[in-house]
Amino acid sequence: MKKFQIRGINTHNFAYANSSNSKSFVMSETNGQTNGSSNGAQPQQRNPYGPHPSDFLSNVSSFQLIESTLREGEQFANAFFTTEKKIEIAKALDDFGVDYIELTSPVASEQSRSDCEAICKLGLKAKILTHIRCHMDDARVAVETGVDGVDVVIGTSQFLRQYSHGKDMSYITNQAIEVIEFVKSKGIEIRFSSEDSFRSDIVDLLNIYRTVDKIGVNRVGIADTVGCANPRQVYELVKTLKSVVHCDIECHFHDDTGCAIANAYTALEAGAKLIDVSVLGIGERNGITPLGGLMARMIAADRDYVLSKYKLHKLRDLETLVAEAVQVNIPFNNPITGFCAFTHKAGIHAKAILANPSTYEILQPSDFGLTRYIHFANRLTGWNAIKSRVDQLNLHLTDAQCKEVTAKIKKMGDIRPLNIDDVDSIIKDFHADITTPAFPPVATNNDEDVEPATKKQRLDQ
Amino acid sequence: MKKFQIRGINTHNFAYANSSNSKSFVMSETNGQTNGSSNGAQPQQRNPYGPHPSDFLSNVSSFQLIESTLREGEQFANAFFTTEKKIEIAKALDDFGVDYIELTSPVASEQSRSDCEAICKLGLKAKILTHIRCHMDDARVAVETGVDGVDVVIGTSQFLRQYSHGKDMSYITNQAIEVIEFVKSKGIEIRFSSEDSFRSDIVDLLNIYRTVDKIGVNRVGIADTVGCANPRQVYELVKTLKSVVHCDIECHFHDDTGCAIANAYTALEAGAKLIDVSVLGIGERNGITPLGGLMARMIAADRDYVLSKYKLHKLRDLETLVAEAVQVNIPFNNPITGFCAFTHKAGIHAKAILANPSTYEILQPSDFGLTRYIHFANRLTGWNAIKSRVDQLNLHLTDAQCKEVTAKIKKMGDIRPLNIDDVDSIIKDFHADITTPAFPPVATNNDEDVEPATKKQRLDQ
């Protein structure tokens, strides 16, 4: 795993917290949690990050995932998945608990077709989909692969109509009807999606969605193909569409402007049911809604639902698998699995986290099989964090002494980056100075700050 | 810069597009743009990503940035900025055009204080702020540093009141009044912010904001300290607050659940005026709204305003400066500057991008001093992308021949990852086979597909 380490991270520069087999820096993680848990310590308070009470159509607590690492993700610049790697990823996604796995169109290449057939034969719990252009040539091949459903897409914006396929809406509609009826006749699921939905004419969109809904598609899809939709725009379009169709609504958001997770959440609030994700968000350009980031978002909203469906503790392994396959590092600031996602540094934060993790964390690292770190070896540290370290070292200093040694540590931290050994030496030197005075203490010395335990401990050493 | 290269990226595996000194794969970038530009090719169409027409309070087209790399960013696990590095970063931020630069509290350490004083003396265009606890001890030090303003913060949620400072709302209010009046008496700007605003009691919040507004603060701040707010929640809180105070509203969003950019945008829609950002979003845990990501979001909404204020072409250098200082890689999927942000791979995308970049890009890479790539050396490639490569190689093949050679390339791409040399060899071999038949052509041969230019070129070689 060395090659996936972020350069320059001194992992020994953190205090290990919340370990079952070491002195812990933190109190119980469930203390004071209001994180959507029905058995939280303060049941009277509604989770402030939960579903909005006025959203009667919200699917925040009943969403599903269409995992597209093996389709959208294959369009990522660095992606080249062998058959074996595709199967490994598909099995890992299935184990994680995704509802659907979407695969590259079988007409993309000969290998794409045979890989699709191979994955269909794995007998996974997740339903297998393939993603094709809205064309009978593609549909005829797709239905023969053994997939559980076909995701059909066609560009409806003026840009795509003009520069991609060059067809008008009536042509698109007729083609969609033919493809949908054909796929339905094979007894498998069918989704019809527009492409670049937010730059499509709203009347065109609603017309074609109503048409395909009446024919009986399982889902209609909205796609922010260029990654520029904003949350309120998403909310309005999904809510409007929800009033027009009876089938489920699926959403696909690119992340060019960093809103793919928020847009997905807002779409669910408005009544969308399914979100397209990929591991680490890999896809065209800088990708789509990432699986891990969406899990962070959703667990803040409805922890019980998320934990009941998805094996979150497998997230890190899943991300590592895909990151290795496409030869990228997991971003330093990745939600949940970024190296610093649960690291606390400033003194004021560390103090409160030590008292109750919920003060600065609404996500519980243990939900993801991860641990929390309190970073205390730096000039922003506070005496509460240092006091914890003193306790962990099994030394005994009064609060006043902890404040004094903290000042020394901050002074050293001003001069150069500190590691944990530096801090420990400063603490130990300080402790030794206090407990081993140059002159023997006399009765008149004011040593009330030095507690008996400290004196005893010195004798023990 | 080698050490900041993402591992395993075959940069030669892309076709260079939009270069002024090479054959370009793409047509004019301004062709068909509707990207908020007042002189776009289709002025009749409102930018679908622009300010919402019903938002009378929106500051999407008049927002300001409080850049906090040197405060929030210093709380990033890996950050240790020397005085020289702080000055270098402050100058780069000022040059980029940020409105405010926020610095670590001068009471954090002795060096923090002297660094603050040094940056105040640089004579930057940006206003310099420092960020302190709501306490007279801190305020007295802060106002002596030469800053243009002080950002005061205090925890108002039950969590922070219970586990951090332990004060009640009336104590908080009295302390806030004392600090605010003291800072105002020094003739500099003052902001009062709650911390963990979304888990604070709404009545408490509105009460204290109204109080400090009446005293005359320049700004009140809302902070999503635990990074779990969602866009509609942000919209509601900001809009409500907007109806209570007359001063400006500043927002600070952590990114734990991946919504920091979307929340910032939605806050501006609701009437917030200032957004806290840091370069690459560095800060506590996985950080806050990133400067670059917000620029991507805002340029999609109002390109003219963003270009008039900020030197976007310096973004990459700024991110590289900070990434080097804190020893992280720029994430592979970073908005705008991630290695693949403007890379197009799937055949269907490449085709449309070649015809008009706006089909799959609403952001113009040239706005950021960057270029677009069409990735054609892979099994998802399409014949339009290959045809462009053929043209770039100054070879001549008919469309039918391009389709034929594309099939060969896709077949090879099924077997192993391709680089550009592989594709070029396949194309050249194919071209040679066509233009150098095993037997000399006779007059009856049907070679109408081979254009005269090809024959001529063959003679030239």
Image (tube, coloured by chain):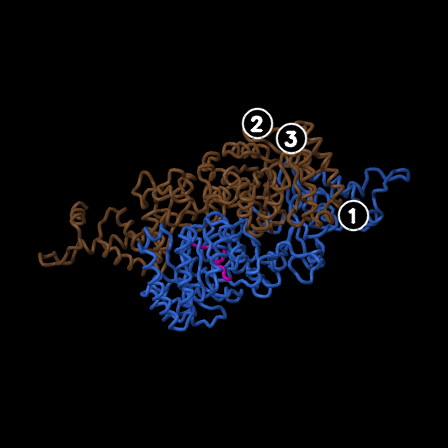
Chain colours: A blue, B brown
Q: Nearer the viewer, mark 2 or mark 1?
A: 2
Q: Which residue is mark 3?
A: B114
Q: Residues within 10 Å of mark 1 (few under 14, many from 20)?
A: many
- Type of the residue with mark 2: Leu
Q: Which mark is residue A243?
A: none
Relative depth, front residue between B328 and A444: B328
Alpha carbon of mark 2 to alpha carbon of mark 3: how far? 13 Å
Q: Which residues are magenta?
A: A273-283
Snapshot quadrant of residue A180: bottom left
Q: Which residue is mark 1?
A: A396
Work out whether disc 2 and disc 1 sit on a shared chain.
no
- Type of the residue with mark 3: Ser
Alpha carbon of mark 2 to alpha carbon of mark 1: how far? 45 Å
Work out whether disc 1 and disc 3 sit on a shared chain.
no
Q: Position of residue B411 (x, y in %)?
A: 31, 61
Secondary element at image label 3: helix
Relative depth, front residue between B57 and A10: B57
Q: Which residue is mark 2?
A: B122
Q: Position of residue B341 (x, y in %)?
A: 43, 47
